[in-house]
Image (cartoon, rainbow, N blue to C red):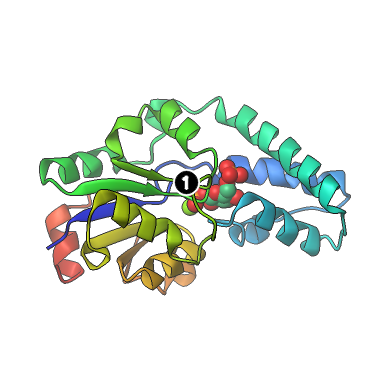
Amino acid sequence: ALQACLFDLDGVIVDTAQYHYIAWRELAQRYGFDLTLEQNELLKGIGRMESLDIILKLGEVDLPMEERVVQATIKNERYLELCQQIVPSDALPGVHDFLKELQDNDIKIGLGSASKNAPLILERLQMTPVFEALIDGNRVTKGKPDPQVFLLGAQELGVDPAATIVFEDALAGVQAGNAAGMKTVGIGQVDVLSEADMVLPGFEALQLASLTEALGF
Ligand code: B16
Ligand code: MG
């Protein structure tokens, strides 16, 4: 039977991708090139320094390590400034109801995010107490698609990976969940997330019973 659900943060609990995009785009523009929304899709679920390397490659810009660290810091400061506008009602539609249903059914809840800012975002949403395990970018050594972030989550919750569902908006995150031996639910578009066991547009109207049945629990 299902024991736990692990949630990605950015793009699953809250739409912070729009703020990451603004901050990365400003960085690209400082170097004289633009970052499209389509290119931004490649960065979802990917850690900060790795994302920076991908962007610089897209713009064919080569920077020494020192300068890359400076630019990543400036990007993060801008991102955090944009995140100041996040309020509790910014949790994506249906998220609160679904988490409540999990709690009512004694299903454990954990977070598996690549973001080093995850604790701060959860605070802004007033959702910190909901998560019994909080695995974020400060705690992993290997980024998604490596399964480490989700395996640590299952370990901390004391659950079997095979009895765990991962909710992810990024292809790299779905791949990480699959590699962890968990069931994966993609939140977003089927064309991007086809490797997931199941793809949903969001949490709105999602019922736990129909989900577990569809995933074979
Ligand atoms: P930070 P997730 C990821 O979070 C984002 O999708 C990705 O765009 C971002 O670069 C990464 O976190 C690192 O975030 O710069 O805040 O440490 O989707 O895994 O929750
Ligand atoms: Mg995400």
Q: In this rendering, would 139 be left or right of 57?
A: left
How far across and down, in percent of the image, does residue 137 sit?
52, 47
Q: Quadrant of residue 14?
A: top left
Q: Tell me the residue at 74%/54% (across/down).
A: 35
Q: Tell me the residue at 38%/65% (across/down).
A: 177
How far across and down, in percent of the image, does residue 160 sit?
22, 63
How many marks on residues? 1
How far across and down, in percent of the image, does residue 73 sit?
72, 38
Q: Tell me the residue at 54%/38% (across/down).
A: 117
109 or 56: which is nearer to us?
Answer: 109
Q: In this rendering, would 129 be left or right of 193?
A: left
Above or below 176: residue 28: above
Counting other residues with Cα less than 10 Å from the Cα at mark 1, is it few (<14), some (14-19), or many (20 or more)? many
Q: Tell me the residue at 50%/53% (across/down).
A: 140
Q: Quadrant of residue 76?
A: top right
Q: Amino acid at mark 1?
A: Asp
How far across and down, in percent of the image, does residue 166 sit?
33, 59
Report whether residue 204 is seen.
Answer: no
For disc 1, the marked residue is 136
Element assignment for label 1:
loop
Report whether residue 198 is seen.
Answer: yes
The residue carrying mark 1 has its beta carbon less than 8 Å from ligand 1: yes
191 or 7: which is nearer to us?
Answer: 7
4 or 15: which is nearer to us?
Answer: 4
Q: In this rendering, would 8 be left or right of 23?
A: left
Which quarter of the image is occupied by the N terminus?
bottom left
Above or below 27: residue 150: below
